[in-house]
Image (cartoon, helix red, strand yellow):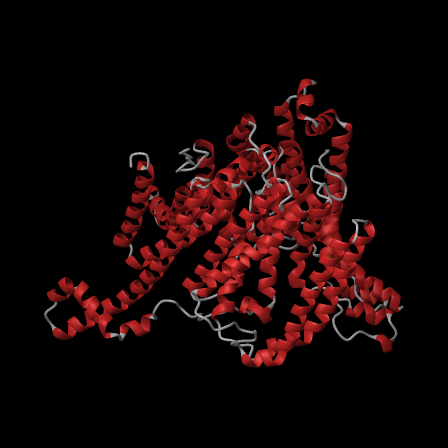
Amino acid sequence: MRKNLNVIAAYSIMMVLILLVGIFQSWNIALSIFNLCLISAVMTMGANIQWGYAGLINFGIMGYTALGGLAAVIISVDPVQEAWRAGGFDILMCLWLIIVMVLVIRFILKNFEKSKLRTYSIAALIIAAIIIIRVTAEPGIEKIEAVNPATTGFLGGFGLPIIFSWIVGALFAGGLAFIVGKVALGLRADYLAIATLLISEIIIAIIKHEDWLTRGVKNVIGLKRPAPYEVNLQTTDWFINLVEKFKSSKLDLITDLSERQAALNQFVIEGSSIFVKLCYSGLFLVVVIILLILTQKALYSPWGRMMRAIRDNEEAANAMGKNVVKQHLLIFILGSAIVGIAGAMLVTQDGLFTPGSYRPMRYTFLIWVMVIVGGSGNNFGAILGGFVVWFLWIEAAPISMFLINFFTASIPETNAIKAHLIESVPYFRFLLMGLGLLFIMRYRPKGILPEKIEIK
Amino acid sequence: MDLINAIILLLNYIFIPGLTYGSQLALGAIFVTLIYGILRFANFATGDMMSFGTMMTILFTWYFQSLGISLGVLPTALIALPFGILFMILYMLTIDKFVFKYYRAQKSPPVQFAMVSIGVMFVTQAVVRIIIGPGDRRFFDGEKFIIKAREFKEMTGLNEGLALKSTQVLTIFVTIILVSLLFWFLNKTKTGKSMKAYSDNEDLALLSGIDPKKIVLVTWVIAGILATIGGALYGLDKSFKPFTYFNNMLPIFAAAIVGGIGNPFGAFLGGYVIAFSEILLTYAYKKFFIYILPESMEPEGLVQLLSTDYKFAVSFSILVIVLLYRPSGIFKGKVL
């Protein structure tokens, strides 16, 4: 118990902060911060597995998040029958061609000696295949995108409950990580960082511009929800009764019957959105707890010990007969898959998929700040990092607004500098994040909750 | 005649824009490579440092404009540049003193430097956005075109016009001067040679009495000059927007690595490799083929290898391929 005092203290402070937001701003804001904190926590756990356990730099978090989001779309949206009839055949044909191409390349790689001729012929094969695929796909894609472009214009998905996408998102991200890991993991640390960053940009470019699959920048809106809709809740009897019970003390103060009804309605509307957010919180919390248990178990297992050995001294681990390449690939896939879950969760919560919103600042570098600030190698630290950094990211604007007003209280409102500062309040969050990261790296390089390994 | 038209077409839409964009990338790439070669880390704050330098230049441009100073046909930004460079260098040295110096003394691994540079990136981004805002800014003044497309058509009687923007000429011109000066400095002067030695083998350089503090100082000064001029030229040619500058970091990295990181000449060429491959692969060649092919063979589609949406993806793919097959870059890096 005493050993974990700092963990408990840190988490309690975090919870109190969120409760304070609930009391002083609104419970709605507090819950949306809490939900996004949970999602961020899942992302940081993924990044922490890669960086903290194995020392692999993955600056491609954005790409895996987006793939998770894509999974949510593909799983939950109903199939667009018309689009399938118009161009489905061409697309399936292309898919088949890609599989053939991969198989042929594998065949060549297996059966021929490494030589210049082999490299060039593979390159030629890939270029030829790309041209053939483009020619086959073009008419199909045009037809699909022409089907009712204002609302669909894409193939749609499978029409399954969106919850499944959390698993599929993990599979998608893991699959991509397998490919990326196969080609890029041999690179030195900083090259790996740049390569993963650029690969994630390529993924985003594809998701943004392949309208037949994702609707691109036209966005997919109105995804199915695992939680009830506010509008339905507001007309459900048990929910109204529940709100009445909760707010009875306030409602009893109002004597006038019609006024009381109006107040109740107001409470029901507020309550419904809080209730929906609570449903999401519950779901997310379950995911976070399951992942936390799994990652903790892994950390203390022989496998976790091996990973740390590889991280701390690759050559020694290699000499001891551990397959470093294979383990790196495995952990790269696992971490990315977790990030994929988070991506699917994020889209589930928002109910919409906006490829244009995936930017490296928000989805890669911010997550890294969370991992470093929280404490790499320590799962509790990583989760805490997700909470703290996301909380500050959201609350930075109000805090800096308050500070500006506090320090410039004597200056009149019309002062140009003051007006300019107030106008640029949203950008203080970058300053806060940057300074936070720099200070933590300088004075507490292991993060708020440092890695602590006990040998039992 | 058709052949000349086709050549003019390519000149107008591929060659001149490619050369301009390549020059802008090249300056940034040399900046990245210098930092990597001498201070030994991948600087993720590259794009934002360039935007800081450009911002200072813009602020001075506005100041001079308000005083009524101008260069006539040339943009006022040229007088503002030295001041922008000065502030950029001051900013870089401040950051180096308060942030990077500590890790250099600790002999931290490059990964930690990269993480720290992400912190610097956040801070710089905030500073730029707080001072000048996130919006799009144009600060070009003076004569916009050297040759206008219409004038060119009237002059030569060709179907295709050749437009030559003054910013394009300025960019190429300034880049050539700057890069030649830089290579002269690195190869001929004592300080430049000691920088090369330091990059090549730090311990040996220290043993032979090279002052590391001086090397670091000179590196940041050169970096500041390159970053500000590269950023300002990009801003003059297109426009200044902090987010674009952050994004430009990626092709700049690509150029530096493709050219062989740590090798300034490679970075210089890498800039053009990236720029031309981006433009060549995403240009629609329909009109070109209409000119050179007989009428019966005219192409139906746009004859475009990739849609322009994939412009960035092209350079990144090149980078990934180079990283996989020739991690030291096309021109062999890691020696300054």
Q: Residue at x 73, y 63 (%)?
A: B283
Q: Residue at x 56, y 75 (%)?
A: A153
The x and y percentages for residue B320 are 67, 50
Is residue B207 something one can see in this rendering?
Answer: yes
B143 or B332, which is in the foreground? B332
Pick the quarter of the image with the C terminus of chain A: top left
| Residue furthest to the left | A255
Pick the quarter of the image with the N terminus of chain A: top left
Seen in the picture, residue A125 relative to A57 is either above or below; the reply is below
All told, the count of numbered labels is 0
Q: Residue at x 10, y 70 (%)?
A: A255
B326 or B266, which is in the foreground? B326
Seen in the picture, residue B176 relative to A99 is either above or below; the reply is above
The x and y percentages for residue A297 are 42, 45
B74 or B20, which is in the foreground? B20
Q: In screen coordinates, is A119 left or right of A331?
A: right
The x and y percentages for residue B73 are 70, 51
Q: In screen coordinates, is B17 left or right of A258?
A: right
Q: Residue at x 42, y 36 (%)?
A: A450
The x and y percentages for residue B37 are 67, 34
Is residue B133 something one can see in this rendering?
Answer: no
Q: In screen coordinates, is B326 left or right of B79?
A: right
